[in-house]
Image (cartoon, rainbow, N blue to C red):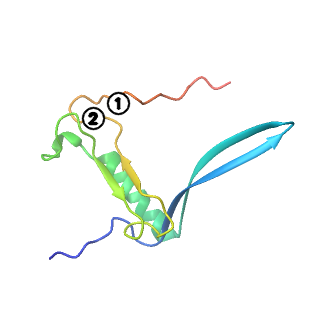
């Protein structure tokens, strides 16, 4: 049996923080994704992101046309025990380059 090798070296913690603030009777709620790591953990996460960015999906034989390459980062395996499970992946589909239907692009016209 082959020993599992994590895609992440060092320490990496990814979690969701919920916030709530009330001012003048108005309550605002928001969430943030927090990504923290030691230098080794952050560098290996950066390498994983660059690997995804540089990948030519058309050259991946076992990736079906229309699929998107991705990696699962799991608590207690690639991530800390306190992390949430995270999937990091390409937004563009193999073959067509199309994005998934739920994607809403950012407004590039900043005010």
Quarter of the figure with residue 77? bottom left
Say which mark, if any, is on residue 93. 2
Say which mark, if any, is on residue 22. none
Q: Is residue 111 left or right of residue 93?
A: right
Q: Position of residue 66 (x, y in %)?
A: 22, 33
For the view shown, which residue lies furthest in the left direction? 61
Relative to 29, residue 46 above or below: below
Quarter of the figure with residue 86? bottom left
Say few, some or many: other residues with alpha carbon within 10 Å of mark 1 (under 14 / 14 to 19 / 20 or more): some
Q: Position of residue 74 (x, y in %)?
A: 38, 62
Callout 1 secondary element:
loop
Say which mark, if any, is on residue 99. 1
Contact check, label 2 and label 1, Cβ < 8 Å: yes
Relative to 94, residue 75 above or below: below
- The answer for how far apart the CA atoms under marks 2 and 1 are is 6 Å
Callout 2 secondary element:
loop
Location of the N terminus (image quadrant): bottom left
Q: Residue at x 36, y 37 (%)?
A: 91
Relative to 74, residue 30 above or below: above
- Dot 2 or dot 1, earlier in sequence: 2
Q: Position of residue 14 (x, y in %)?
A: 50, 59
Q: Residue at x 18, y 44 (%)?
A: 63
Location of the C terminus (image quadrant): top right
């Amino acid at each position: 049996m082959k020993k599992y090798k994590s895609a992440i070296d060092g320490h990496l913690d990814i979690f969701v923080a919920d916030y709530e603030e009330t001012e003048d009777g108005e309550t605002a709620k928001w969430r943030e994704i927090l990504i923290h790591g030691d230098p080794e953990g952050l560098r290996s996460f950066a390498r994983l992101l660059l690997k995804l960015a540089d990948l030519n999906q058309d050259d991946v034989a076992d990736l079906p046309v229309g699929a998107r390459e991705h990696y699962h980062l799991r608590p207690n395996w690639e991530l800390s025990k306190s992390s949430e499970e995270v999937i990091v992946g390409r937004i563009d589909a193999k073959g067509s380059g199309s994005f998934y239907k739920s994607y809403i692009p950012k407004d590039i016209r900043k005010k």
